[in-house]
Structure formats: structure tokens, C-alpha cells
Amino acid sequence: MTPPSPKDAAAVILLPPNTDPHNPQVFWVRRNPKLVFLGGFYAFPGGKAEPNDIDAKVEHCADDSERAAMISCAAREMFEETGLLLARGAEALTVGQRASLLDDLESGRMSWPELLRHYGLHLDANDFTFVGRWVTPPFAPRRFDTWFFLVNCPAKQEPRVTGDAELESGEWIAARDAYAKWEQNESLVA
């Protein structure tokens, strides 16, 4: 039997301001245990690419449309999952305005590229440091080709997870502590 083809995806490894470079804090989320795919696992916020991710303009990335689409995907997924808006210009928005934008996106009133254009926001490739790519093994029933980006948490924003159908919780954790929890079988990590 031929394994399923992996779907494009992207994830964000978020760092808080002034984190210790020798043991940085990262933000991870716990997937709802009721999910069929990797339920109960910890992961970095992210998800599969949508067709219109390619339509969002990404500055400093004009010569690499695949990278631009994955940056757009990472930023959109981060916004949908945590309310954190990784776009230039977002610093001028209040918490209430960001919530309203998220509602516009989730309700389908606006697509991701339309939302960015309408509110004068833009993505900048310089804010997203590519740190690796992981492809789900062929034996998995669902497969993803995931790009990982290191991103600094924007000033005046804090990620939040509301405990919806997909994600149960989110927290800042020292990278070494996350690794130790995985190594000691205290947490499942995807």
C-alpha cells in the first residue's frame, strides 16, 4: 500500500522577549486528547497550509514563493490558534481589535490575505527564521511536510489558548524542561 502524500504545513517556535539563549523559553500547546490525530500531544502552534496562504504578501521573500506561502501559513495558524498576530502593523492594534480581526477570519467574512490587506498589515520574512523541516513518517495515516520557524513574540501581545476543540492548553516552558518531560515520558511531543 502506498503511503499518503504529506500535506504542506508550518509551525512557529515562539520565543518571549529577553529569553535565555542557552535555555530559551518556548510556547507549546497541548492538543485536545479527544482528537484522532495526535490527541493529547504537545506541539508548537501550527497546521496545514490553505490554498490562499500563497496570496498573502510576504516582504523580503519575493524570489521564493514556497517559503512565502509557508510563512503565511505559520502566521495564520498562530493567529487562529493563539490570537497572536505576527504581522507588521499589529502593534498598533488593541486586544479588542485583534479579537475582532480573528472573528473576521474565523467566520469567513475575510480570507487571511484580505484581512492583512484591509487592515494595512504585512508579513516580513525577516521576522521568521527557518529552523527545519519535518515530514511525518510513511507509516502514519496522516502525513505532513512541516516547516518550522523561530519567531520572537511581538511586544504587547501574549499567546492564549482558549481550550477549544483542537487545543486544550498552551504554556511557556524552558526548552530543556520540555525535553526532560518528553525524555521521562511525562509528555507526548509531536
Image (cartoon, rainbow, N blue to C red):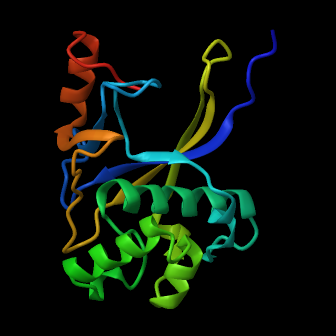
Question: Can you give x and y, in whole percent of width and height, for residue 84 in the image?
Answer: 31, 64
Placement of the N terminus among the 4 image quadrants: top right
User: Residue 103 occupies which quadrant of the picture?
Assistant: bottom left
Left or right: residue 164 compared with residue 140: left
Placement of the C terminus among the 4 image quadrants: top left
Q: Residue at x 51, y 89 (%)?
A: 118
Q: Is residue 55 above or below residue 77?
A: below
Residue extending farthest to the right is 2
Q: Residue at x 75, y 29 (%)?
A: 5
Q: Is residue 69 above or below residue 137?
A: below
The residue closer to the viewer here, 162 or 47, is 162
Left or right: residue 180 compared with residue 40: left
Left or right: residue 96 compared with residue 38: left
The residue closer to the viewer here, 48 or 146, is 48
Question: Can you give x and y, in whole percent of width and height, for residue 164 in the image?
Answer: 28, 46
How many numbered marks, from 0 up?
A: 0
Question: Can you give x and y, in whole percent of width and height, for residue 105 in the image?
Answer: 45, 70
The residue closer to the viewer here, 140 or 36, is 36
Q: Residue at x 69, y 59 (%)?
A: 51
Q: Is residue 57 above or below residue 167?
A: below
Question: Can you give x and y, in whole percent of width and height, for residue 53 in the image?
Answer: 63, 64
Left or right: residue 129 compared with residue 82: right
